[in-house]
Amino acid sequence: MDTGMISSRLNLNVRQTQGMISVKTTLGKLESHFGQPKMDGHYEAPRSGVYATQPSIEIDTYPSRHSYGFTNHSDFAKEAQQKGFEGASEGRSRRTQEAWNYIENAAKPGRNVPQEMAQSKLRDNFRVKRHMVAQAIPDPKITVHPSELQGSNDRGDISLKITPPAKAPTNFTPGHVDIELTQAADTHRWISMGHLDLRA
């Protein structure tokens, strides 16, 4: 064949275009909102209830004053009672002796019993021996009461209560997949002869 002539050979040309799709995936989402817990507190400040008593001194001077003759009502009554008992006993004994003296001697000649008794009593008064007793004056009684701690401390109170919410609200968003055909598949065929395309 002459090279200057168009070649009569036929060629089958095929061009294939692949289909294209786009896939968009949206994930599911679970949302949970927890509320803030409620907190209640109670505070009571501690307090000190401890205190100290004042020291005191008690001075009892009665023993000293009693030695000088000062007598309170209680001691005066006791001393008067004792003297009364002693005087009554002494008087009873003396009256008994005088009665027996009258019985035994009043009827005797030359005896003057009342005069004899009066003279005897007078002589006894002169025969009484007076004496003095020197003794130390008692010291006063001194009692010291030291200071004391009394009362108690209040430690106060601290309490805390936390209450969480009973429910937690939730929100669920389901996931989904979006598919879109962005390019359709295609097969294109044509015939060419040499360098010339023959379109159908």
Image (tube, helix red, strand yellow):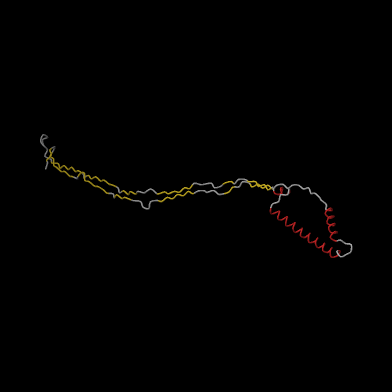
Q: Is residue 109 left or right of residue 147?
A: right
Tell me where residue 73 appears, x and y as whole percent.
Answer: 69, 53
Q: Of 59 and 4, which appears nearest the observer?
A: 59
Q: Quadrant of the C terminus?
A: top left
Q: Is residue 43 left or right of residue 117?
A: left
Q: Quadrant of the N terminus?
A: top left
Q: Residue furthest right?
A: 110
Q: Of 167 and 160, which appears nearest the observer?
A: 160
Q: How many marks?
A: 0
Q: Of 81 and 138, which appears nearest the observer?
A: 81
Q: Where is 2 relative to 124, above or below?
A: above
Q: Quadrant of residue 2?
A: top left
Q: Residue furthest top?
A: 4
Tell me where residue 165 appears, x and y as whole percent.
Answer: 38, 51
Tell me where residue 113 appears, x and y as whole percent.
Answer: 85, 61
Q: Of 200 and 138, which appears nearest the observer?
A: 138
Tell me where residue 154 appears, x and y as whole percent.
Answer: 52, 49
Q: Is residue 108 left or right of residue 95?
A: right
Q: Is residue 48 left or right of residue 186?
A: right
